[in-house]
Amino acid sequence: MPEGPPKVALPLNESLYLLHPYNATLITTKTPDGQNNVATIAWIIPTSVNPPLITMSIRKNRFTYPIIQETGEFVVNIPTFDMAETVLRAGRMSGKNIDKFAELPFTARKAKMVTAPLIEECVAHLECKLWKTFEAGDHDLVIGEVIAAHVIEGYFTKTWDITKFRPAQHTGKEFFTTCGLETIEIKF
Ligand SMILES: Cc1cc2nc3c(=O)[nH]c(=O)nc-3n(C[C@H](O)[C@H](O)[C@H](O)COP(=O)(O)O)c2cc1C
């Protein structure tokens, strides 16, 4: 086999971004005194089917972090590519000093099972109860159990209809991409 193109060594902190793109999500919470907040989280993965668990990697200094620990709940909202600018802005401001629901074009709607709000403009929502938290370097692994989930009708039948859903995929820094329209099914 002929030699491929040369590969260059990367600083280790940059190497994590080789794993991107990741679908950016909008995590909503409500403080015990009733303030809604939203934060952008791209480091989030499915973790267990039964019980249905997801894990996000979040720094302790986010306004979102202590709210999740105190209230024990949050919602993972799935935005679309056309929302990328708002998704970035939600991840560059903190609820510590700004009401992001007032500043950004997000509409809060009542969730089914948790007090944290849904974002109407998002295509899907996973309502979660805090399951466990683990320290991991400079981020914590916050694991949530999904207790309700809903999606726009016609967008998802066991898998996403990628002709309808265009995820806001974060490639790093201020860059976003989305899926192409091609889906292939591998017969196996
Ligand atoms: C595209 C994008 C992805 C982000 N992903 C994460 C993440 O996975 N974990 C994290 O702790 N912060 C992440 N952030 C940073 C937080 O969104 C940011 O610190 C935000 O201000 C937190 O809001 P809060 O203080 O209101 O909770 C991301 C920011 C952007 C723009």
Image (cartoon, helix red, strand yellow):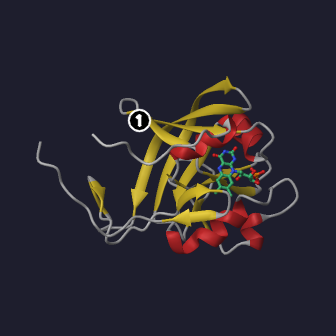
Task: Give the residue furthest to the front.
Answer: 2
Which residue does the image show at 88% across and 58% down from the upper left?
97
- In the rendered image, the vertical position of residue 72 relative to residue 22, given as above or below: above
Of residues 65 and 72, the one nearer the viewer is 65
In the rendered structure, the answer to whether residue 23 lies left or right of residue 65 reads: left
In the rendered structure, the answer to whether residue 132 lies left or right of residue 146 reads: right
Provide residue 144's location: percent of width, then percent of height: 54, 36
**Quarter occupied by the C terminus:** top left
Query: Which three-letter amino acid code belongs to the residue tagged 1?
Result: Pro
Which residue does the image show at 73% across and 36% down from the upper left?
70
**Quarter occupied by the N terminus:** top left
In the rendered structure, the answer to whether residue 102 lies left or right of residue 156 reads: right
Provide residue 153's location: percent of width, then percent of height: 33, 67
Which residue does the image show at 57% across and 43% down from the upper left?
8
**Element at label 1:** loop
Residue 67 visible in the shown view? yes
Which residue does the image show at 48% across and 56% down from the upper left?
125
Provide residue 152's location: percent of width, then percent of height: 38, 67
- In the rendered image, the vertical position of residue 154 relative to residue 62, given as above or below: below
Residue 107 visible in the shown view? no
* Residue denoted by label 1: 52
Task: Give the residue furthest to the left.
Answer: 187
Mark 1 C-beta closer than 8 Å to ligand 1: no
- In the rendered image, the vertical position of residue 75 relative to residue 123, given as above or below: above
Task: Give the residue furthest to the right.
Answer: 97
Provide residue 79's location: percent of width, then percent of height: 53, 64
